[in-house]
Image (cartoon, rainbow, N blue to C red):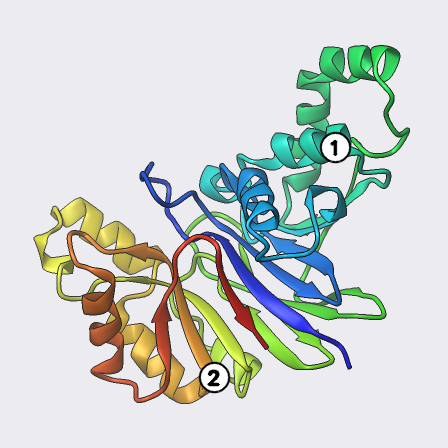
Amino acid sequence: MSRAQVIILGSGTPNAEADRVSAGVAVAVDGQPYLFDCGHGIVQRVAQAHASGKIAWDTTTLARLFVTHLHADHSVGLPDLLFTPWIHGREEALVAFGPPGLKRMARHILLAYEENIREHRAAHPSSEQGYKIDVSEIKDGLCYQDERVEVRALSADHGDLAAFSYKVVTPVGTVVISGDTKPVAAFADWARGCDVLIHEVYSSARFGDLPPAWQRYHSRVHTSAIELAALARAVRPRLLLLYHQLFWGLGPDELVAEVTDGYDGQVVSTNDLDVFDL
């Protein structure tokens, strides 16, 4: 029987935090990870999870990437994802999927590091393909399928940036990852009945403490705890995981309580390196 896990590699936001790196989630099926976003510190978190025995796979198996949008906290780790696993011995190119602009980003990263690539290939044992990247810029619908998973995309609403949510269908359950988004009308039907919903959230209780300009921004492009509770009532996941959490001074339990005030399902405030079995 197949085994699938969700690994929260980065649960944070654009803000630098002592105990959270920025966005990154792996869905691993039978030891093959599928990575969703690569903020700062994600490759390091994989090394930590492997060293501590939380996962059996290592950085060299990081070969499938799905990017929700091109904000830096979801993509700034891409050079690390290209080159560090290659140094560790990855032999295949990284295959990446995401919004328009990802091809250009990848091309310029390779240009920026061309001296590193040249010297490493000349002076060190290394694979021919392990530093390369094959990018597909996607639309709504099925974007990837292999013998383990089917990955579908749905347009998110994150302001002026093209953005996607992803649904990962495995042999033992379905995982939905929101990315950064305000509530989208089609999302509830699309995600309904998933086993795990991983969703961004900000504190409704502390929202009023923000300056007006930040209130306008967050209400336009993110999801409040009250909105998430309503969404979860419609989706009814077996497990709701909070990530990319804007606490604004609250503790994790208090943010969970904001959601469970309006939703009676199981809710967990995630931390980096949390692992959940499907």
Q: Position of residue 73 (x, y in %)?
A: 45, 41
Q: Position of residue 65 (x, y in %)?
A: 68, 50
- Tell me the mark number nearer the camera, choosing from 1 and 2: 1
Q: Residues within 10 Å of mark 1 (few under 14, many from 20)?
A: few
Give the camera-side residue of 110 and 34.
Answer: 34
Give the residue drawn at x 21%, y 47%.
214
Give the camera-side residue of 194 and 41.
Answer: 41
Question: Which quadrant of the figure has residue 207?
Answer: bottom left
Tag 1 near tag 2, CB within 8 Å: no
The residue lying furthest to the right in this view is: 128
- Residue 245 numbered mark, or none: none
Amino acid carrying mark 2 in the image: Pro
Q: Which residue is mark 1?
A: 88
Q: Quick one: SS at disc 2?
A: loop
On screen, 206 above or below 125?
below
Give the camera-side residue of 44 and 13.
Answer: 44
Q: Which residue is mark 2?
A: 237
Q: Quick one: SS at disc 1?
A: helix
Give the residue drawn at x 34%, y 44%.
19
Give the camera-side residue of 144 and 213.
Answer: 144
> Which quarter of the figure is the C terminus placed in?
bottom right
Image-based side of 204 in relation to 83, left or right:
left
Amino acid carrying mark 1 in the image: His
**From this viewpoint, is residue 186 visible?**
no
Question: Which quadrant of the figure has residue 3?
Answer: bottom right
Q: Residues within 10 Å of mark 2 (few under 14, many from 20)?
A: many
> Which quarter of the figure is the N terminus placed in?
bottom right
Question: Residues under labels 1 and 2: Cα distance?
Answer: 37 Å
**From this viewpoint, is residue 169 visible?**
yes
On screen, 179 above or below 75?
below
Q: Position of residue 216 (x, y in %)?
A: 22, 53
